[in-house]
């Protein structure tokens, strides 16, 4: 009898404590909401249109978005979310689960300009991004803000100067090898797989002076671990929405992969750090032997700092370029007339057997326009570091207040997808939804309306490297082939968004060799 009274009493006090905690939590959140609304007003701006404002509706939206992502329908999801806002605020919305955790999503070029340039110091990658990515990328250029980022940028910038990139030997080596892996005329190949292996090899060659050789050995421990760690990284990035419970997710395989990547890269670093300083200085004069790693070793002897920067540049340089090349071939396969025009330019500027130079590639207009047209798709996120306001998108529109800790997202895909930012369709300007390199002959996007490489102080330092690598690759392929046939299902193809956006089902194609003179 006594024990059952004690049991009932125990449950009763548990419920009382639970209720009390809930009341304190709700009161605290209400207080926080009042305080934050006052801060928003004090900044002189407004809130963006709120599409969800509590844990239930926000949780539903998060699960809905994850479902869309797993169905490779993120472009569609973005469009539907923007459509929830009324027409007068169609290009910005706010998503909030609790008053302290707001995400603002914008596709206003004026806002992107403020985030990346005008109000640069108020925005950055932020602590959450750093927490999720730092086990893999450390304190590198990719994960840091402020002085840490500035130092990284200064460290790596010299290696992206034109005189370093204009040496095309690395591209020649790796692209030549990739083409030798394409089966004979008419046989199907997933060219996306070859592009990912080629860009891994070209970037490691550029960074270390030796390639990962994934073209010859796709199943090496390093290649496998590098691909695997990225899948884990994306999962961890999505799970951050469930913080602090995301810490419970298993990281065993992720840590193992990082260990394997380090085992591959650290011997190169140790070897370079053993080179006497005067030898290292002598090497800077060499066009062919001086590597990115040598350059890092001139400024720091800390193997961890060097390791972090190398991996960050490898990550930034590989997938983006491979995905863009994959989309280029996918688009071209649907347009034999554009393949003909591109090939005619290649034959005119380089000939069937000539070797392209940096200057020739720069002067090939149709090739550049083809790559620019492909690059109208790319994602990126930013987190607000300080209280600030986003300026009015149009005269008379309200400013939007941003508070420290808010996450601000913008996605080039959604900006490039805004039809109202393009001129009307005409003979010279095809429907913006269509792939048309020709539009670039008479059209120049306004600033901040075309941002595949970002802009402002954090603009992609590898832009020139990437454009040169991709142009070189296209020239070499079009010297050999004059027809590309898509062997997949056009209607089934989708965008897969992870670190970058790439064709979800690869790019199965057949290349046909041109008759040689
Ligand atoms: C088509 C190819 C490429 C595209 C579309 C691209 C695009 C971008 C974008 C959008 C960013 C900003 C990301 C962010 O802030 O979250 C970025 C940053 C960066 N990219 Fe690229 N990139 C490409 C190729 C490359 C290559 C080939 C390299 C190096 C070999 C490279 C190195 C970097 C680095 C180091 C950063 C960080 C810059 C910083 O935070 O200051 N990228 N890139």
Image: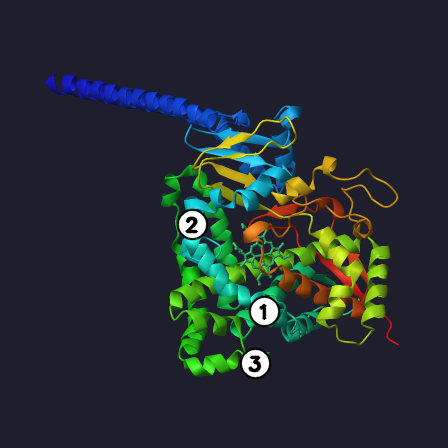
**Residue corresponding to mark 1:** 201
User: Residue 191 is drawn in which quadrant?
Assistant: bottom right
Say which residue appears at 39% left-offset and 65% top-offset.
304
**Residue corresponding to mark 2:** 130
Give the Cα distance between marks 2 and 3: 36 Å
Q: Number of callouts in the render?
A: 3
Q: Nearer the viewer, mark 2 or mark 3?
A: 3
Whichever of callouts 3 and 1 sits on the residue coming sooner in the sequence is 1
Q: Nearer the viewer, mark 3 or mark 1?
A: 3
**Crowd around label 2: few <14 · some 14–19 · many ≥20 (10 Å):** some
Q: Which mark is residue 229?
A: none
**Viewport quadrant of the N terminus:** top left
Secondary structure of residue under mark 3: loop
> Can residue 413 be seen here?
yes
**Is the CB–ligand 1 distance for label 3 below 8 Å?**
no
Image spot of residue 451 (x, y percent): 64, 48
Q: Nearer the viewer, mark 2 or mark 1?
A: 2
- Outermost residue on the left side: it is 2
Tell me if label 3 and label 1 are in contact, CB under 8 Å: no
**Viewport quadrant of the C terminus:** bottom right
Please state which of residues 216 and 353 is positioned toward the viewer in this rendering: 353
Give the Cα distance between marks 3 and 1: 21 Å
Does residue 154 appear to the left or right of 90 in the view shown?
Answer: left
Image spot of residue 399 (x, y percent): 56, 29
Please state which of residues 236 and 116 is positioned toward the viewer in this rendering: 116
Say which residue appears at 64% left-offset and 74% top-offset.
167
> Can residue 253 be seen here?
no
Image spot of residue 272 (x, y percent): 44, 77
**Residue corresponding to mark 3:** 286
Does residue 309 appear to the left or right of 69 in the view shown?
Answer: left
């Amino acid at each position: 009898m006594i024990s059952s009274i004690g049991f009932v009493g125990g449950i009763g006090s548990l419920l009382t404590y639970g209720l009390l905690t809930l009341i304190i939590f709700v009161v605290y959140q209400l207080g926080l909401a009042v305080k934050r609304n006052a801060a928003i007003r004090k900044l002189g701006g407004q809130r963006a249109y709120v599409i969800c404002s509590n844990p239930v509706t926000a949780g539903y939206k998060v699960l809905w978005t994850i479902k869309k992502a797993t169905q490779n329908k993120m472009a569609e999801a973005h469009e539907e979310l923007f459509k929830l806002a009324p027409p007068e605020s169609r290009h910005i919305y706010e998503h909030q689960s609790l008053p302290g955790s707001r995400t603002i999503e914008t596709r206003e070029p004026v806002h992107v300009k403020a985030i990346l340039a005008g109000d640069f110091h108020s925005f950055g990658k932020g602590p959450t991004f750093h927490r999720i990515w730092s086990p893999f990328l450390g304190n590198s250029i990719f994960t840091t803000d402020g002085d840490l980022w500035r130092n990284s940028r200064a460290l790596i910038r010299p290696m992206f100067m034109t005189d370093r990139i204009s040496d095309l030997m690395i591209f020649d080596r790796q692209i030549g090898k990739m083409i030798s892996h394409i089966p004979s005329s008419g046989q199907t190949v997933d060219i996306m797989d070859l592009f990912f292996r080629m860009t891994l090899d070209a970037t490691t060659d550029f960074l270390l002076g030796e390639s990962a050789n994934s073209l010859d050995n796709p199943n090496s421990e390093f290649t496998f671990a590098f691909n695997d760690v990225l899948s884990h990284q994306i999962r961890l990035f999505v799970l951050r929405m469930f913080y602090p419970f995301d810490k419970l997710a298993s990281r065993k395989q992720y840590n193992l992969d990082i260990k394997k990547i380090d085992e591959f890269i650290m011997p190169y670093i140790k070897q370079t750090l053993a080179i006497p300083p005067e030898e290292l200085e002598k090497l800077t004069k060499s066009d062919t032997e001086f590597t990115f790693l040598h350059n890092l070793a001139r400024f720091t002897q800390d193997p961890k700092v060097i390791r972090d920067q190398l991996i960050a540049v490898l990550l930034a340089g590989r997938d983006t370029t491979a995905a863009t090349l994959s989309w280029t071939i996918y688009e071209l396969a649907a347009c034999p007339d554009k393949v003909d025009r591109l090939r005619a330019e290649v034959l005119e500027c380089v000939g069937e057997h000539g070797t392209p130079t940096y200057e020739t590639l720069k002067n090939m207009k149709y090739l550049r326009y083809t790559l620019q047209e492909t690059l109208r798709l790319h994602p990126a996120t930013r987190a607000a570091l300080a209280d600030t306001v986003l300026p009015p998108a149009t005269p008379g529109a309200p400013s939007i207040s941003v508070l420290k800790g808010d996450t601000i997202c913008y996605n080039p895909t959604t900006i490039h997808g805004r039809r109202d930012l393009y001129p009307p369709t005409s003979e010279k300007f095809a429907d913006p939804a269509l792939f048309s390199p020709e539009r670039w002959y008479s059209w120049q996007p306004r600033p901040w309306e075309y941002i595949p490489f970002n802009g402002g102080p954090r603009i992609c330092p590898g832009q020139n490297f990437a454009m040169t690598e991709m142009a070189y690759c296209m020239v070499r392929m079009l010297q050999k082939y004059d027809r590309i046939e898509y062997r997949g299902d056009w209607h089934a193809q989708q965008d897969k968004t992870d670190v970058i956006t790439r064709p979800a089902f690869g790019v199965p194609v057949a290349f046909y060799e041109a008759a040689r003179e």
